[in-house]
Image: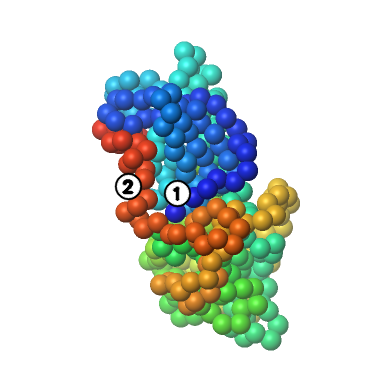
Amino acid sequence: SPDQPLLGVPIREGTLWHLSAQDRFESVTFSLFVNGFAFSTLDGREASVSLSPFSLIRNCRFQSGECARLKSFKVSLQEPDPCCYFAVRSTQEREAEEERSEWVLGLSHTILLIIDSLLPMAELSCDPLPGIPKTFRRLLAGYLIHRDDPDALSVVYCELQAPVGPRASLVIYESDACKSPIMEIPIFESSVCCDVVGINCSCFVVEGHHFASQSSSERKLWLRALSNLKVKLQNKAPEPTQDELLHFRSAIRENIRTLQATQESRIARDPLLRLVEKPSRAFSTRDRVQQAASNGDQDLPEAPEDDVRQKIEQVNGALPQSKPVSL
């Protein structure tokens, strides 16, 4: 839920324009925190929103009216809605572009920090586990965040396996011990595997399942591996031999090393979202992550999707009828 307390003190503050009703915008004081943002109007109205690993930041442009003169961006809390619109106003276009860029980069880095705080300190792997036959066809494995529903997500260990017959598999485990699969997503030649568009976004979709990786570079590696498997399935390639599996792993291992060489050191020590134990529709009962900021041992209530939409509508008023275009 985006209606949760923000942590610490603001890491950036400034003045932005909040776009609400048709062609109506007002100056707000905007504060960015490590797990979300808050803003207040001149007449004292305040709002705060906590972000999740699946929040998206995008530049956008309004096609007509006063809003078209602003350098705007939107924060999407759940695709395709709800979202908030903000903008930078300046007489100098280059200055406005630079300020907008600073804000959207700050917001996108906040989302990556949240992801970083949730994922275990474990490297990507392409090697099977000794004594565990179910991993012998492993090509790529690592921890990802899975969106179970609009209010909750899970940290899971995912393993991409080489094809058997007409399909490959993305197998999901509770941990890197790979004791028992939680779920298996079949990958066919027509399977939909795609990225999610957003600034510095690390999210991607596999057959309707939304995942978030530690970085956009890691997302690229997962999608490249998935794409290569789909090409082999489309070409009706025979099942790979053990020698071919070794060759595939060697290529993937080189990409993992390149990724690790350019990856920034992790700085988040504590989860910025709260761990809870509850049953899941997508998985069996286990630890899940509620989209809420940490608040000691107090249980935080979940907000249904309708409540999320109502909160954003209260913040925004009516969304602009001057249709924005994502850039």
Please indicate whether residue 10 sits to the left or right of residue 20 in the image: right
Quarter of the image with the N terminus is bottom left
Q: Quadrant of residue 252?
A: bottom right
What is the C-alpha distance between the residues marked 1 and 2? 11 Å
Regarding residue 147, the answer to whether it shows in the image is: no
Q: Which image quarter: residue 190?
A: bottom left
Q: Is residue 148 visible?
A: yes
Outermost residue, top side: 91
Image disc number at residue 319: none
Residue 219 percent location from the top left of the image: 55, 55
Element on which disc 1 rests: loop
Q: Provide residue 118's location: percent of width, then percent of height.
A: 61, 58
Residue at 55 percent across and 53 percent down: it is 293
Label disc, if present, on residue 3 of the rendered structure: 1
Q: Residue at x 69, y 64 (%)?
A: 122
Asked if 56 appears above or below 166 in the picture, the reply is above
Q: Which residue is mark 2?
A: 310
Q: Nearer the viewer, residue 150 or 9?
A: 9
Precedes in sequence: disc 1 or disc 2:
1
Please determine whether, in this image, residue 105 is positioned above or below residue 111.
above
At x 50%, y 37%, the residue is 38
Q: Is residue 97 above or below residue 218?
A: above
